[in-house]
Image (cartoon, coloured by chain):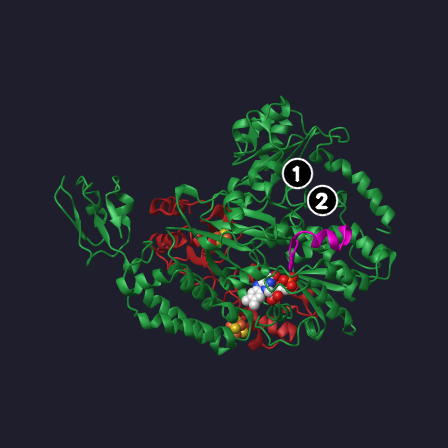
């Protein structure tokens, strides 16, 4: 690639590949595009088999010339997966099976009749298809990071170029000075999406201003928060955006080498990213003399190896260097002294994905979105007890209520909302009373939760908050690298207390001790892992203290989760079929045929077999 | 059951990998990833070969291998069962599923069954939260599980 002109020409040529998806039927050589989500969620649900089925049926109907089958990244609505969208109609098919491919091919692609019974709920009125951005799930969303996820085939660089891909890099390298770029990024107000929320522009500025013979750009794709998967989806659905952004960062700060650190658990993302890097090299968008300037930039993938703490930036750099991934004290910050001691910009995947559009559309366009202090949009992974599990992107400042009930569709099975956990193991639980707070970095921190990387797990009345706090703490105890004592020993002690609480062997004074210990760990740990590990405990203690007290004082788990505090009882609805008696492994159940049975709670080992076997729901756990 | 892990063939593959990475900055992690793939684990014998070839001290390599949960020193079973214990799966009863596997496959979490058939792991979020709760057996993914014992029995019966 030599010039902006050449890129523009390529864009014009490539547009015919995607016009149909924008509703332009005239300038497209094809009749239909069949977009099949190939994100991890849908692949797990057999999306690849569906793709093969489409190829097979299209061949049968001689449609291989007229219909394009493209694999895309995640559409976000994983709950409805596997998802297939057919353009130009924009027909949004959900829960598609390989068998459905035949019907869609025959009815829709051959005869032109949309298969209405397969359409996503809420995506049509009668026979009329609602435009995708009017579907309730998408209506309140604003897709910037995810704009191209689900719209382009990530394995084809031309489709990215058709949507102005690499134009920001051309603009940066050919028309802007490094300082101008950094000013633009600073002015946009974008803050890091990896958890810390530090100003990206200022970070780049530190690195630019540090003199060194070598500098590096690193992309943090370690995504450790269990329950967050936006970075993975971006890498899977729009990998070129990350490559382009890293090159822009390289040009701005004077670095010629970049590394993308991806979790080993993300094989699809790694594979797509590698394909994208190879294509970018082939097109001269990576490598030497990019756009015939004297700017060189190269990119390599490094795999993580299953250690949560490697998401912490200094630990991550140690890991790339080939060492145990343990954090270092900061300062020095990586921006000044990073990889192999050289100044290093390290940013999160989602942060990078915003950069090309800021360069193209300007700082103001970006800062007009969001709230004071938190500009732009944020991607959240909705999970847990929520109808539309999946990935959403919303403007900062939207309320939790809008996210959970309008976009997320509320709580399934008629259950009641109880809490939402944001920020994963570093974050906290928010309750009903916080639902109308606008979501941004500062509000969440103020409420004792955290933006974190954007995991949002919804809980209903069946979840025990003490158990949830314990779950997160077990995670951090497991993942503590052991370098410093407050975190290594302290979190373990906290866990011991929680274990006593959930097994009914604690006392009220321990709740205060738990709180004190938590506060001490927060202030004395070396890295963010230890500093934030007590948050889930502190926030549940604050918002759900009565639940803790019920465990300690009454030896009861109000939600019926903590096994040690539960007992099994047989209700009067028992008809005496003796099925449970025969299956109980410890013979704890007695009773005559056709009479109400009885469980001896002392003998019962709470294995739950009787509940599963009983056909009359006659066994109660409380 | 002890499996033969180190053989000529695999060592030759390791050689090729090392030739490609040796000398590059930060070569250890990529070499270890490849070793884990080639041998299915990274026993001391393999660590020694890597130490000799790269000049990185054996103690350092051992330290790195044991730090990361993705690397293992012991070989794993023929079928690695991964029960996702990420948040999204956990709140949908993944703990119960894990218990059912422990009981029915007769193997403890993090261990391999005596006949070498199953290894049971409690894994981190595998990124299929939309399908929660999720388990994997080697490459196969089972999602939207109901968390009852019969379901686990049905899955195990396939292997
Ligand atoms: C324990 C721990 C885990 C972290 N995990 C991640 C992660 O998975 N992904 C990420 O981008 N940042 C993570 N971070 C934050 C990084 O240290 C760093 O702030 C971030 O990558 C900087 O990029 P940003 O400014 O674009 O957010 C983690 C921090 C800590 C303390
Ligand atoms: S706070 Fe925990 S994870 Fe961080 S350095 Fe200390 S021991 Fe390691
Ligand atoms: S929490 Fe299980 S796949 Fe994400």
Q: Do tag 1 and tag 2 residues touch (Cβ < 8 Å)?
A: yes
Residue A29, quarter of picture? top right
Per the image, the residue denoted by label 2 is: A156
Find residue B143 and report its horizontal and vertical position in percent: 46, 45
A543 vs A127, left or right, is left
Q: Is residue A38 left or right of residue B93?
A: right
Residue B156 highlighted magenta (yes or no): no
Residue A371 falls within the magenta-colored stretch = yes
Q: Is residue A344 above or below residue A127?
A: below
Residue A117, x across and y down, in percent: 52, 28
Magenta stretch: give its range.
A359-376
x and y, in percent, of residue A407 in the image: 54, 44
Task: Tell me the residue that label 1 is attached to.
Answer: A70
Colour of chain A, in one word, is green
Q: Is mark 1 within 8 Å of ligand 3?
A: no
Numbered disc total: 2
């Amino acid at each position: 690639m030599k010039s902006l002109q050449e890129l523009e020409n390529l864009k014009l040529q490539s547009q015919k590949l995607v016009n149909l998806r924008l509703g332009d039927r005239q300038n497209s050589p094809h009749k239909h595009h069949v977009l099949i989500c190939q994100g991890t969620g849908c692949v797990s649900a057999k999306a690849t088999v569906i793709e093969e089925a489409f190829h097979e049926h299209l061949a049968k109907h001689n449609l291989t010339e007229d219909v394009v089958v493209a694999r895309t990244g995640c559409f976000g609505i994983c709950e409805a997966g596997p998802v297939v969208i057919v353009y130009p109609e924009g027909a949004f098919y959900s829960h598609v099976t390989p068998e459905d491919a035949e019907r869609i091919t025959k009815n829709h692609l051959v005869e032109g009749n949309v298969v209405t019974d397969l359409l996503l709920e809420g995506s049509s009125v009668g026979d009329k298809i609602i435009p995708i951005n009017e579907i309730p799930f998408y209506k309140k969303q604003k897709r910037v990071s995810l704009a191209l996820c689900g719209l382009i085939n990530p394995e084809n660089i031309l489709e990215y170029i058709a949507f102005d891909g690499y134009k920001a890099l051309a603009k940066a390298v050919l028309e802007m000075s490094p300082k101008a770029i950094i000013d633009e990024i600073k002015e946009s107000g974008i803050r890091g999406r990896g958890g810390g929320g530090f100003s990206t522009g200022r970070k780049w500025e530190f690195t630019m201003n540090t003199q060194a013979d070598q500098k590096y750009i690193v992309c943090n794709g370690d995504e450790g928060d269990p329950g967050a998967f936006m970075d993975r989806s971006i890498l899977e659905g729009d990998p070129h955006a990350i490559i382009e952004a890293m090159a822009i960062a390289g040009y701005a700060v004077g670095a010629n080498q970049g590394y993308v650190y991806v979790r080993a658990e993300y094989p699809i993302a790694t594979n797509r990213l590698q394909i994208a890097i190879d294509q970018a090299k082939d097109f001269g968008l990576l490598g030497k003399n990019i756009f015939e300037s004297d700017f060189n930039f190269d990119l390599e993938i490094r795999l993580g190896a299953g250690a949560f703490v490697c998401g912490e930036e200094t630990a991550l750099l140690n890991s790339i260097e080939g060492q145990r991934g343990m954090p270092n004290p900061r300062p020095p910050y990586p921006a000044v002294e990073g990889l192999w001691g050289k100044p290093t910009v390290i940013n999160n995947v989602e942060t990078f994905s915003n950069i090309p559009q800021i360069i193209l559309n300007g700082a103001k366009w970006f800062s007009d979105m969001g709230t004071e202090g938190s500009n732009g949009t944020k991607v959240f992974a909705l999970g847990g007890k929520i109808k539309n599990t999946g990935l959403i992107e919303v403007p900062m400042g939207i309320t939790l209520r809008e996210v959970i009930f309008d976009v997320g569709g509320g709580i399934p099975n008629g259950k009641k909302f109880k809490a939402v956990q944001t920020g994963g193991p570093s974050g906290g639980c928010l309750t009903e009373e916080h639902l109308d707070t606008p979501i941004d970095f500062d509000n969440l921190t103020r409420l004792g939760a955290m933006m974190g990387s954007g995991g949002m797990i919804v809980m209903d009345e069946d979840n025990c908050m003490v158990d949830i706090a314990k779950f997160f703490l077990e995670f951090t105890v497991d993942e503590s690298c052991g370098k410093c004592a407050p975190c290594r020993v302290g979190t373990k002690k906290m866990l011991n207390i929680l274990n006593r609480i959930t097994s009914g062997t604690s006392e009220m004074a321990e709740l205060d001790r738990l709180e004190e210990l938590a506060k001490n760990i927060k202030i004395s740990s070396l890295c963010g892992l230890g500093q934030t590990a007590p948050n889930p405990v502190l926030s549940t203690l604050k918002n759900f203290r009565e639940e803790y007290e019920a465990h300690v004082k009454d030896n009861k788990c109000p939600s019926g989760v903590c096994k040690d505090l539960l007992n099994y009882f047989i209700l009067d609805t028992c008809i005496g079929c003796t099925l449970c008696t025969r299956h109980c492994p410890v013979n704890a159940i007695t009773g005559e045929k056709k009479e109400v049975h009885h469980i001896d709670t002392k003998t019962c080992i709470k294995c739950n077999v009787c509940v599963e076997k009983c056909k009359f729901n006659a066994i109660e756990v409380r | 059951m002890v499996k033969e892990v180190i053989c000529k063939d695999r060592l030759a593959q390791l050689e090729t990998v090392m030739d490609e990475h040796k000398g590059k900055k930060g070569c250890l992690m990529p070499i270890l990833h490849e070793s884990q793939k080639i041998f299915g684990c990274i026993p001391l014998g393999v660590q020694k070969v890597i130490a000799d070839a790269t000049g990185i001290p054996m103690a350092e390599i051992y330290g790195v291998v044991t730090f990361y949960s993705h690397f293992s020193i012991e070989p794993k079973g023929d079928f690695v069962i991964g029960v996702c214990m990420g948040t999204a799966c956990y709140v949908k009863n993944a703990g119960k599923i894990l218990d059912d596997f422990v009981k029915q496959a007769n193997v403890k979490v993090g261990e391999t069954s005596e006949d070498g058939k199953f290894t049971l792991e409690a894994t981190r979020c595998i990124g299929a939260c939309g399908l929660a709760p999720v388990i994997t057996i080697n490459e196969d993914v089972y999602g939207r599980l109901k968390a009852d014992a019969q379901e686990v029995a049905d899955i195990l019966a396939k292997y």
